[in-house]
Amino acid sequence: MNMPLRPLRVLCALCAISASGFSQKPAAVKLATVLPAGTSYHRILQAMAEEWRKTPGGVPVIIYTGSQMGDEADIVRRMGIGQLHAGVLSVVGLSEIEKSVTALSYLPMMFRSLEEVDFVRTRLQPDLEDRLLKRGYVVLFWGDTGWVRFFSKEPVLHPGDLKRMKIFAWAGDNYQVDLMKSMGYQPVPLVSADILPGLQTGLISVVSTAPFYALAGQVYGPARHMLELNWAPLVGATVIARNTWEAIPAATREALAASARKVGDEMRARGRAEADQAVEAMKKRGLKVQPVSAQVEAEWRALAEGVYPRIRGAMVPAEMFDEVQRLLKEYRSKPSR
């Protein structure tokens, strides 16, 4: 199945600066994001950029929105060669740097609430940040935009309904494409910029993405059906290249980090709230929401659990997969849960 995170780009990550970019503080930080211009996320980023500019010793931030700099993989590549200094990344982009982060999003139906997502992310955070640091990046904050849902041109209720449809898959993710084919599905590898044209022309008929992205990207136009199933969380983080970060005076870094943490909290809260608001807005414009019964949810859970052995060690490192399961067992064993 199309794992989260490749859709919609998250909605919740902020700044990534290439470790190979600068040995001295840059005159301006070039930040790229797949987030659309004019959205609340963009406005929050603009507010952060203004705070960074005004901070004594800080730097201006130039923001490139939408897909001006390509997909997240392109953003990471551009950071690697110094064309960009920063990027708003979901787990899709972060995994180009450090694969262990996939444990936060590439596990469909494993998380049953956003409280579980928060618990696991918080517990994994020190380890993940250490791994990213070893790759040359400092994490400024983590975030998410709620749940990924299925948007389709025809109604979808049961897992088998997807087998007659052409499903968006991320170009370059050959393992996922092969996995979906082996399960009897019809993946169509595309870049994110081709999602809407693909739906409009019939090249694809279903995509998994966050409601915010479906609204901002007008996916709900041709794909007028949404399955109300919490498939997986869409998680992201803001990272900055260690070399660039350490070139900034310590006092300034402290102020910039505080600003980024504030932005992270705001983006996470806004993202979760706007997920529901986006659904309501799309319903007013013709979106049809398909509710899911406990029985149908069990069918999807069985599908997901059946593919876990093929995700473990291939899409998600085995030790991280096992740790997520251990943490969820710990969380669910508490009397108050």
Image (cartoon, helix red, strand yellow):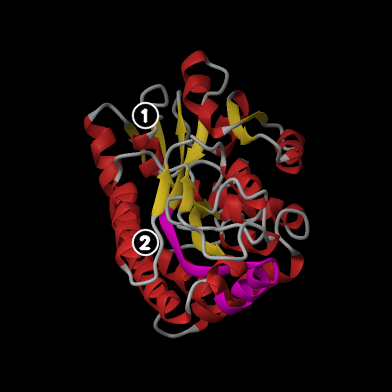
Amino acid type of the residue tagged 2 in the rendering: Arg
Mark 2 Cα within 10 Å, few/some/many (few <14, many 20+)? Answer: many
- The residue lying toward the viewer, choosing from 315 and 224, is 315
Q: At x 54% / y 33%, what residue is drawn?
A: 192
Instruction: Name the residue beneath numbered marker 1.
Output: 218
Disc 1, disc 2: CB below 8 Å? no
Q: Helix, strand, or loop for circle 2? A: helix
Q: Earlier in the sequence, mark 1 or mark 2?
A: 1
Instruction: Name the residue beneath numbered marker 2.
Output: 268
Q: Is residue 159 above or below residue 218?
A: below
Q: Is residue 132 magenta?
A: yes
Q: Please state if 155 lies on the left or on the right of 47 as rendered.
A: right
- Is any part of residue 107 visible from this angle? no
Question: What range of the chain is rendered magenta?
Answer: 125-146
Q: Is residue 278 above or below residue 219?
A: below
Q: At x 68% / y 61%, what residue is drawn?
A: 98
Q: Please state if 321 lies on the left or on the right of 241 as rendered.
A: right
- Is any part of residue 42 visible from this angle? yes
Q: Please state the horizontal and vertical placement of residue 86, each as a whole percent of the image.
A: 52, 54
**Residues under labels 1 and 2: Cα distance?**
22 Å
Residue 144 occupies quadrant: bottom left
- The residue lying toward the viewer, choosing from 224 and 58, is 58
- The residue lying toward the viewer, choosing from 230 and 209, is 209
Q: Is residue 76 above or below residue 127?
A: above
Amino acid type of the residue tagged 1 in the rendering: Gln
